[in-house]
Amino acid sequence: MEHEPSGVLVLAGTPIGEVADAPPRLSAELAAADVVAAEDTRRLRRLANALGVEVPGRVVSYFEGNEAGRTPELVRALLDGSRVLLVTDAGMPSVSDPGYRLVEAAVAEGVRVTAVPGPSAVPTALALSGLPVDRFCFEGFLPRKTGERAGRLRELAAEPRTMVFFEAPHRLAEALAAMAEAFGADRRAAVCREMTKTYEEVRRGPLAELAGWAADGVRGEITVVVSGAPPADPAEIGPDELAALVAGREGAGQPRKEAIAAVAAELGLPKRDVFDAVVAAKKKA
């Protein structure tokens, strides 16, 4: 009779800036882990030193470049009964950071997965933004190429939930300008910079205004929060907007037929009208 794996995978949040924000359990897990998989082993050592913790377990790197190759090795350790701790440079693993692939593989092998809740830039920026947070979606980093970024933003133009993006400081002005073009210059947003750090700054205002501010250059870790689209009058929604609403749902994983039906029901329109708008958009592409 086969026994269930006795190892456990622990996903631990790490500070996004202020070391004192580290959850108390992080120190205990660092001291107890058989293996610590870290996005940057040097940053891990600095964090452990700041926390006054010795890391007796084996420390290995686990980042985007070696994630696919190292995952099987870590799964084998879990199946052998090891306690594996996964940490990234800042925030929670898997949130635009390494982690998902390892969690998926561990779950497939029946390994227990647990977490040490900790800081994350996403809810922190939402709380600071001053924008509605009852419903939101996380979009991560936008595509770097201009055309791909514009296409993604067009899909999100009618998204009613508050949106959260990560962005590199040297691309911030360009990204904000693209958002202003896709969402409207007056759409409210907030740029949260260096959260919890010495030079923390939150800029709030219309997208066009924020794009002008960022044109002078911005440094640090950036999270952008953008308000969702206001409720639209179905009579004023054109075919392109209908197609964009369907595309947004498809991008979230909903089958096209279901997306068309959902958009039609939401707006009180015949499904045929929405279907025709999608077909017309495909012909234009």
Image (cartoon, helix red, strand yellow):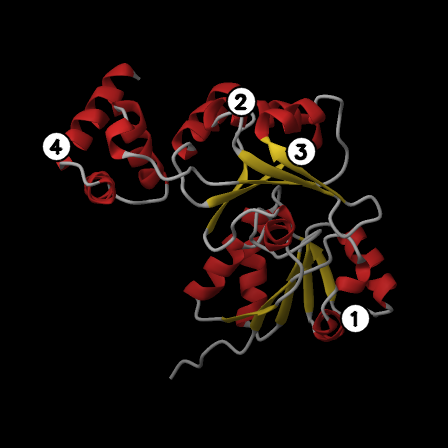
Instruction: Name the secondary structure under disc 4.
Output: helix
Describe residue 133's horizontal placement relative to residue 255 as left or right.
right
Quadrant position of residue 157: top left
| Label 4 packing within 10 angstroms: few (<14), some (14-19), many (20+) | few
Q: CB atoms at circles 2 and 3 under 8 Å apart?
A: no
The residue tagged 3 is 168
* Image depth: mark 2 or mark 4 in front: 4
Q: Residue at x 74, y 75 (%)?
A: 28
* Image depth: mark 3 or mark 4 in front: 4
The residue tagged 1 is 56
Instruction: Name the secondary structure under disc 2.
Output: loop
Q: Is residue 230 above or below residue 115?
A: above
Q: Residue at x 53, y 33 (%)?
A: 142
Which three-letter amino acid code belongs to the residue tagged 4?
Answer: Arg
**Sequence-earlier tag: 2 or 3:** 2
Q: Residue at x 72, y 53 (%)?
A: 16
Q: Nearer the viewer, residue 13 or 104?
A: 13
**Sequence-earlier tag: 1 or 2:** 1
* Image depth: mark 1 or mark 4 in front: 4
Q: Is residue 149 above or below residue 9?
A: above
Q: CB atoms at circles 1 and 4 under 8 Å apart?
A: no
Residue 128 in picture, x, y percent from top left: 65, 50
The residue tagged 2 is 145
Q: Is residue 121 above or below residue 209?
A: below
The residue tagged 4 is 272
